[in-house]
């Protein structure tokens, strides 16, 4: 028999965070085998019946992986009632969540999955996985300013890691980051006295946005999954 804490069970089923699970349990909304659940109790998915608000909760058995071209004004984190969230614009039968975030003014590639392990590998700073963006600013940006961003700037009281920056034209450049920090590119551009006009993510590791139109999404191909598995050294089959 393999048991796990109830809070972790609800989290792994992509129902809520562990903290939110505790709130549900304290509010007597969670039952195990018909009895009110307790914080910290252990459950066995093969034996116990867990319900939340009268809905049976089962752990996800099959991992799925999608890529989506996020349009403007779509929220990837917690949203207000009047806002449109990333999961509101897809019709995916499995429970999925976005890996990382793109702010509402940023477009481009975002991955949707139910695999927490992949999310951890791509987001955790120790792995330094690549994300590539196309950035358009207002006015001309100078070579020394691009060089400064490629080396480091201070944002949020900490130096950024080295980035690969390549000019496209007088006001547009590509940048490859190996860290996930809140509004990082916009903050970096502000540090060299410019303002972002357009920002699009076009690549996460080997996964390319390609010709996917805004609002469109598709499952990652077997070739993409095999390549990503090799790069991350994890099994995504």
Image: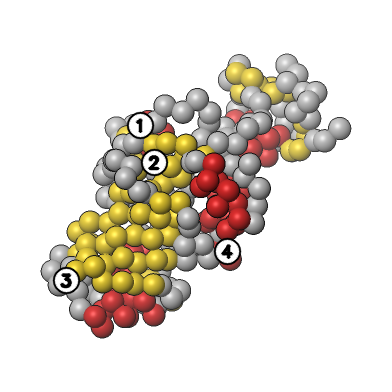
State whether residue 148 is above or below residue 46: below
Residue furthest right in the image: 1
The label shown at residue 89 is 1
How far apart marks 1 and 4 lie (CA) works out to 30 Å
How far apart marks 1 and 2 lie (CA) works out to 10 Å
The structure residue drawn at horizontal position 78% and vertical position 30%, both measured from the top left corner, is: 44
Nearest the viewer among 171 and 157 is: 171
Residue named by callout 3: 170
Can I make out residue 187 in this image? Answer: no
Residue named by callout 2: 68
Residue 177 image position (x, y, % from top left): 42, 66
Residue 95 image position (x, y, % from top left): 53, 31
How far apart marks 2 and 3 lie (CA) works out to 29 Å
Residue named by callout 4: 127
Q: Earlier in the sequence, mark 1 or mark 4?
A: 1
Q: Earlier in the sequence, mark 2 or mark 4?
A: 2
Quarter in which the C terminus is drawn: top right
């Amino acid at each position: 028999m393999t048991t796990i804490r109830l809070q972790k069970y609800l989290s792994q089923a992509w129902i809520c965070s562990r903290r939110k699970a505790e709130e549900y349990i304290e509010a007597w909304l969670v039952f195990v085998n018909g009895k009110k659940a307790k914080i910290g109790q252990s459950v066995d998915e093969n034996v116990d019946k867990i319900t939340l608000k009268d809905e049976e909760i089962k752990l996800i058995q099959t991992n799925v992986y999608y890529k989506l071209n996020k349009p403007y004004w779509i929220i990837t984190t917690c949203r207000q009632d009047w806002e449109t969230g990333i999961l509101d614009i897809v019709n995916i039968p499995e429970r999925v969540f976005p890996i990382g975030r793109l702010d509402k003014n940023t477009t481009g590639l975002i991955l949707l999955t139910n695999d927490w392990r992949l999310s951890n590998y791509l987001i955790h700073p120790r792995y330094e996985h690549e994300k590539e963006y196309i950035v358009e600013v207002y006015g001309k940006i100078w070579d020394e300013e691009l060089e400064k961003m490629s080396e480091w700037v201070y944002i949020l009281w900490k130096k950024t890691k080295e980035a690969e920056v390549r000019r496209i034209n007088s006001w547009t450049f590509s940048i490859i980051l190996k860290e996930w920090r809140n509004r990082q590119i916009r903050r970096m551009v502000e540090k060299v006295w410019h303002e972002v006009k357009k920002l699009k993510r076009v690549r996460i590791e080997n996964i390319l946005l390609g010709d996917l139109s805004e609002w469109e999404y598709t499952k990652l191909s077997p070739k993409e999954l095999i390549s990503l598995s090799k790069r991350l050294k994890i099994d995504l089959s």
